[in-house]
Amino acid sequence: MNTPVTGPEPSAEWHAQSAEQVLQALAVDPVQGLSSEAVAQRLRTYGHNRLPAMQGVPAWRRFLLQFHNPLIYVLLIAGGVTLALQFHVDALVILAVVLINALIGFVQEGQAEKAMDAVRGLLASRANVWRAGARQPVDAGELVPGDLVLLESGDKVPADVRLLRCKNLRITEAALTGESVPVSKHTEAVLAPAPMGDRLCMAYSGTLVATGQGMGVVVATGARTEIGQIGTLVGGVQALVTPLTRRLDQFARQITAFIVGVGAVSFAYGYWAAHLPAQELFMAVVGLAVAAIPEGLPAIVTVLLAIGTRRMARQHAIVRRLPAVEALGSVSVICSDKTGTLTQNEMTAVHLVLPGQRLRVTGAGYAPLGGFWGGDTAVQPAHTPQLLALARCAGLCNEARIELQAPANAQAQLARTPGAVGAETEAEESRAAGVWRMVGDPTEGALMTLAHKAGLSAELLSAVRRLDVIPFESEHRFMAVLVQAWADAADPEVLLKGAPEVVLRLCTHSGGQPLDGAHWQAAVADAAAQGQRVLALAQCRMPGGTRQLSMADITPRFELLGLVGIIDPPRPEAMAAVAECQWAGIRVKMITGDHALTAAAIGAQLGLATSHTLTGEDIEAMDDEALKNRVRDTDVFARASPVHKLRLVHALQAQGHLVAMTGDGVNDAPALKAANMGVAMGHKGTDAAREASDLVLTDDNFATIARAVREGRVVFDNIKKTLLFTLPTNGGEAGVILLAIFLGVALPVTAGQILWVNLITAVTLSLAFAFEPGEEGVMRHGPRPPTEPLLTRPLVLRMVFVSLLMVAVTFSVFEWELSRGSSLEMARTAAVNMLVVSELFYLFHARHFTRSAFRLETFKGNPVAIVVSLLMVAVQLLFTYAPFMQAVFQTRALSLNSWAVIGALACALFLVIELEKALLRWFGVWRM
Ligand code: ATP
């Protein structure tokens, strides 16, 4: 913890002081904000705006916790009794099994925690501040007292803030007060004793802006904020427990209980029916228990999940909740936003409809290079008043900025090009175009570029002052500003832009004529059918002296200035990802705020079914039952708002689907929470959406969801493969002992030896699956039904089959050695090696469910498998030939003949499993 607790005291009652007093106390100019020197100096004084990390569980406790597990208790009891019976070597091996297992669990859990921490670190919050007279986005950790922060709907308040300006600002303070209804804020001081919930002129760190906008001055950061005082960690710490790990844990316990039962029965049988000596029998039963208890399973699964999240993070998908990794594998429908996720979000206005004429706009991207054409004739904006009026509205009713950026290499490039600044030729133009940057919403960026192309530069646009604004929201689909020219005393005017249905309804005339609704509707449909996003622009005068703009002012009295058609092409990788999802049995549905025809055109380019689309209005007209029926074969939903998303999630879930839903706005949060997999956008998304989500895309790209689904499937498959390997090998080891007891014959493998096998497979072979890259065809089959049991029928059959095979080959080698006159010790050494070699061979089979192992990939696909196999071979040679091992485990040096038989039997086992796989493939089984 390096945050010095000095500076403005939290007890300073900022809420009881006027805005001026607060600004004065914090020595900040409300117009300029802090200078960069002041920021640097305050950062040194107050430290970063971070909450002290929550104290984790200390290492020694985490290590001890590894032993807190019924599986381990059984092993420890077995070890204790073994020690009491003076079987020192066996007791030692059991202890080693337990210790090594705890160590592996401890190290792996630590790595899993680290992976999750790193992933969490990628989700750092950003804040918009006003510093040195300009708005700039900064890392929220860099805020200092005195900073002026801007708040808007969806933002998480980054520090404790005294509000200076509010517009419909409502904040949800549940994180602090537990109250989930948003509180309306104002800027007036309140009485000093007011409880936190009543300090309406304050916005507290960690709370969420529900609606509106505001600006305030930071009064406390980091540990000095109210939330820092409470000591809660906002954002939530992830537990490494998921429904799946819980299920596996429970499963391992059931197996343990079952094994203890079997052990008791075997002991009773051996003692009373087969009259075996009690001590030897007891040790055999202990060996049986240790062999069969899957003590390493829970830790391996946790690690598999954590490794999966790390791999996803590298591919731009950040898992906020670990259970999401498993759920990803079963996702059967992905509902995605269009703009920016399926499309490039690089908008260009290409088409204008003015009263009486249509124009084509040339140029691409945000560079204001290009012109206007009516058919083949170039149109001069300066001589076309209607075009100028439209462009003026586009430029003024706008929050975006385009600027000529001069990054080092671009500058150098321009410097090398004589005359590039006044570029005349196409080539020079496009080179200059590379350095134009847009800040803000892409739709508005396209309109700002349009205004610049029409000759309206930033200076010209600043000839008017903005008096008030109604910001764009997806719910009402328009934006309006109240402006007045600085120079003349003309009445103020409202400039309006938005979705054509909304704006046309508000217009009464256009180009001096009454509005011809049908004509304009047709023009809208025409542009939308080409996949263009269409905006209508309008204006109207307001009575002199009007200073504020409210929803009540937006009534049908506007003059329509025209339509702008904007293109935003689909992302090429999104097209491929949609196709891949469809292959993988996952239905992709596009939900957009855009016009139905625009949505259908883009949907068709993406390969979605567009024969019927539904609009938000259609959805509203349907009851839940009707929606449930329609949702199945509709892929495109247009003019949809967040409420519709929520209903769609419910309708799809009612159909039995596991739904992934994307969202970015504050109002998307309920749909994200309701979906099985809420997916938020890292760039354009709000903090509110991110907090409600399970998965955050740092590149806002649909293709990333598809990749995450693939990764989720691989993780789930690998967990299954771990079971597929661990359970039959445990089963084989235990089966050998069980069979010997019930046949009343000498044990082919002693208790100590079986403990040894268990020990070394735990540290070698079982780890290989954490690094398994996944089946090639993982996205060529439908998703796993969420209700599918962990142990499916093919899996159980395989387990029993392989267990029996292992028992059979082990007994065969043992009997063969005895029959050719070898000593009991020699026969046992051969049997142990047989068991180990068959496990080794089976490892390469278990890498794929039913795919043939006769491929080069079997040996090249997972290098870790090779390394652990070699390690195992080396250790096993020591076990067989090293004198001290021979003394401890009563092993004997095997002859080449013995190895030849072991090798031949292992090959036979390999072939038989290969045959079983072929049979399963023939029946169409490809996974288990
Ligand atoms: P998607 O849901 O696919 O991401 P979207 O969220 O971008 O789409 P909205 O932002 O809700 O969709 O836009 C809906 C409609 O509102 C657009 O078709 C456009 O006509 C209009 N619109 C979009 N942005 C603005 C804006 N900044 N100002 C005014 N109108 C806008």
Image (spheres, rainbow, N blue to C red):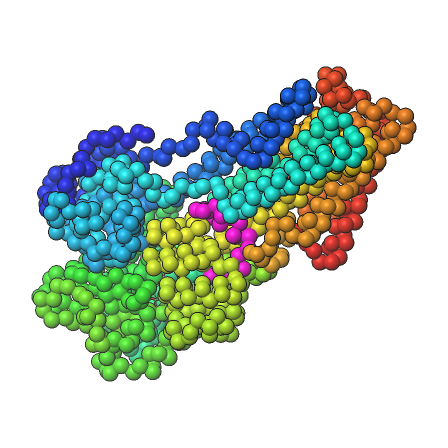
Left or right of 452 in this view: 719:
right
Task: Please say whether residue 36 is visible from this viewpoint.
Answer: no
Residue 251 falls in image quadrant = top right
Placement of 490 over or under 764, stated as above or below? below
Residue 179, horizontal then vertical, whole percent: 27, 52
Q: Residue at x 87, y 25 (%)?
A: 822
Q: How many marks?
A: 0
Task: Please say whether residue 3 is visible from this viewpoint.
Answer: yes
Q: Residue at x 21, y 62 (%)?
A: 469
Q: Report the magenta residues as a range.
A: 317-335
Left or right of 770 in this view: 2:
left
Q: Does 330 appear in magenta?
A: yes
Q: Does 587 appear in magenta?
A: no
Residue 603, horizontal then vertical, whole percent: 48, 67
Residue 15, horizontal then vertical, whole percent: 15, 45
Residue 927, horizontal then vertical, whole percent: 66, 52
Residue 83 falls in image quadrant = top right
**Closer to the camera in the image, 406 or 326:** 326
**Closer to the camera in the image, 194 or 499:** 194
